[in-house]
């Protein structure tokens, strides 16, 4: 029997925060509702996206597909775009044909009936373009396909190569080696830290637990499960809590003036981040250009090769589109064709999730990493090793709980407080699901 996540969601009241201003439902079957097109008539599609220069990327499609024209409508992205779309869904009109959607937002959008299942409207070969962990983010563990992956954000380790050379430290390949390197650097210079534990962005912590094998939500029929405080998550929390307690890792939140300054002054000499990190480093640490390198994320066990993700988005077809099949055709072209993937990489400057055509599109390292010719070879080597991870319909509730609970833990500098913060996240997330009518097992 074909499983459909939406069926297990729309029969229930959805999280008040997610749908306080939204609701309603609509037909998610892409095989129905498409408006007939007369011979010679052009199909017009509207695409909400926040990726840079997406309108120019789409020109390649419009130049070669005279029967289907796509118009890009620039959006602010993130929660703002999600709220805007859900408002249109509730109103029954106003939604675009296509929507750039973050992976973590898909359960919310599917649960509200905002997205169409496009499995039957894309080619059978589309799945083969993506790593298993990325593909699972658009199926939500069901037999349906709610979007085509657009960009991925595998976690990697960014470090100051000159500092490692100065202190004669090998690039860590395991987390034990990372801890030893952090201690040595801080022992050599008490003002320097290999990294920070940041409590203002749950996405990074979620990605680290993803690498360790955690998946914070699960769906079985109509019942959700929550495993934020799993053994895998506890291992990650204990590790970082121990480093903070020992004082060898900083606890300054990321993206603050203090953290930005530390990167540029050379007192923050490492960053566990995603493939998009060069842009952030170039903006915040311009004085250190040419001194950084990237390596695969350290592993929990020597010889393993697995990572998590921090960010990434997809191209989805909305349930209000009158031309779902044409929209799905465009989504597949944008994210799997050689022309589309090249335009995503070189015009919109995103790291394509596609694994078959991205290598040909990414031929030069980011300018900030011009000293490392194999930057994208390293990225490609880890992009296919992203563990599967299921987001839930109240991801924002869990992330908000993280900011509060781990903020207090980081300030306390006690390792035990980090695992206690996980328990707080777990209980608040489960309670929110139950209070909004979800079955939680």
Image (cartoon, grey):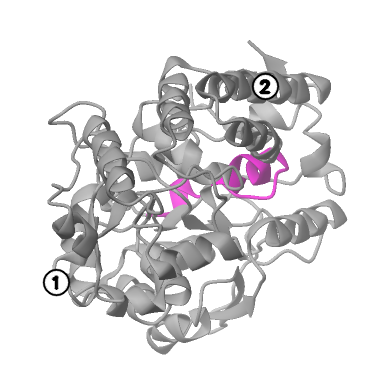
Q: Which residue is mark 1?
A: 373
* Residue farthest along the top direction in this orientation: 441
Please tell me which residue is depicted at 52% across the width and 83% down the height of the picture.
55
Q: Position of residue 273 (x, y in %)?
A: 39, 53
The residue sitting at 28% across, 57% down in the picture is: 159
- Image position, residue 82 (x, y; %): 70, 56
Marker count (numbered): 2
> With respect to residue 55, does 377 lie above or below?
above
User: In the image, which residues are magenta?
Assistant: 104-122
Residue 20 falls left or right of residue 331: right
Quarter of the image holding residue 366?
Answer: bottom left
Q: Position of residue 224 (x, y in %)?
A: 62, 20
Q: Residues within 10 Å of mark 1 (few under 14, many from 20)?
A: some
Q: Which mark is residue 424?
A: 2
Question: From what the image shows, is residue 170 above or below residue 378?
Answer: above
Q: Is residue 155 magenta?
A: no
The residue nearer to you, when weighing 168 against 421, is 168
């Amino acid at each position: 029997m074909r499983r459909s996540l939406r069926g297990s969601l729309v029969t229930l009241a959805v999280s008040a925060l997610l749908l306080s201003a939204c609701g309603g439902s609509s037909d998610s079957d892409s095989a129905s509702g498409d408006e007939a097109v007369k011979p010679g008539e052009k199909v017009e599609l509207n695409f909400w996206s926040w990726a840079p220069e997406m309108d120019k990327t789409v020109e390649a499609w419009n130049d070669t597909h005279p029967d289907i024209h796509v118009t890009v409508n620039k959006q602010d992205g993130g929660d703002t775009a999600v709220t805007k779309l859900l408002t249109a869904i509730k109103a029954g009109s106003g939604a675009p044909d296509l929507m750039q959607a973050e992976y973590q937002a898909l359960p919310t959008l599917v649960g509200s009936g905002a997205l169409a299942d496009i499995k039957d409207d894309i080619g059978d070969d589309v799945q083969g373009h993506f790593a298993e962990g990325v593909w699972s983010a658009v199926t939500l563990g069901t037999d349906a396909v709610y979007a085509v992956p657009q960009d991925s954000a595998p976690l990697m380790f960014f470090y100051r190569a000159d500092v490692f050379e100065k202190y004669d430290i090998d690039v860590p390949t395991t987390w034990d080696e990372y801890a030893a390197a952090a201690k040595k650097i801080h022992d050599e210079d008490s003002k320097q830290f290999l990294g920070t534990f940041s409590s203002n962005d749950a996405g990074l912590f979620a990605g680290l637990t993803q690498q360790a094998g955690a998946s914070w939500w699960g769906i079985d029929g109509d019942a959700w499960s929550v495993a934020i405080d799993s053994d895998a998550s506890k291992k990650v929390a204990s590790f970082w809590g121990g480093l903070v307690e020992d004082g060898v890792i900083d606890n300054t939140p990321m993206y603050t003036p203090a953290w930005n300054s530390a990167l540029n002054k050379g007192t923050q000499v490492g960053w566990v981040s995603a493939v998009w990190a060069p842009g952030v480093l170039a903006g915040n640490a311009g004085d250190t250009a040419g001194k950084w390198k990237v390596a695969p994320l350290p592993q929990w066990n020597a010889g393993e090769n697995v990572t998590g993700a921090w960010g990434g988005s997809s191209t989805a077809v909305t349930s209000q589109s009158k031309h779902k099949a044409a929209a799905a055709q465009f989504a597949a072209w944008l994210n799997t064709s050689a022309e589309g993937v090249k335009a995503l990489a070189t015009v919109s400057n995103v790291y394509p999730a596609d694994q078959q055509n991205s290598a040909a599109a990414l031929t030069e390292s980011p300018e900030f990493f011009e000293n490392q010719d194999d930057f994208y070879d390293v990225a490609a080597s880890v992009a296919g090793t992203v563990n599967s991870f299921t987001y839930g319909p109240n991801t924002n509730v869990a992330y908000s709980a993280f900011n509060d609970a781990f903020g207090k833990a980081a300030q306390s500098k006690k390792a035990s407080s980090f695992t206690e913060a996980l328990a707080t996240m777990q209980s608040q997330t489960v309670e929110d699901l139950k209070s909004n009518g979800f079955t939680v097992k």
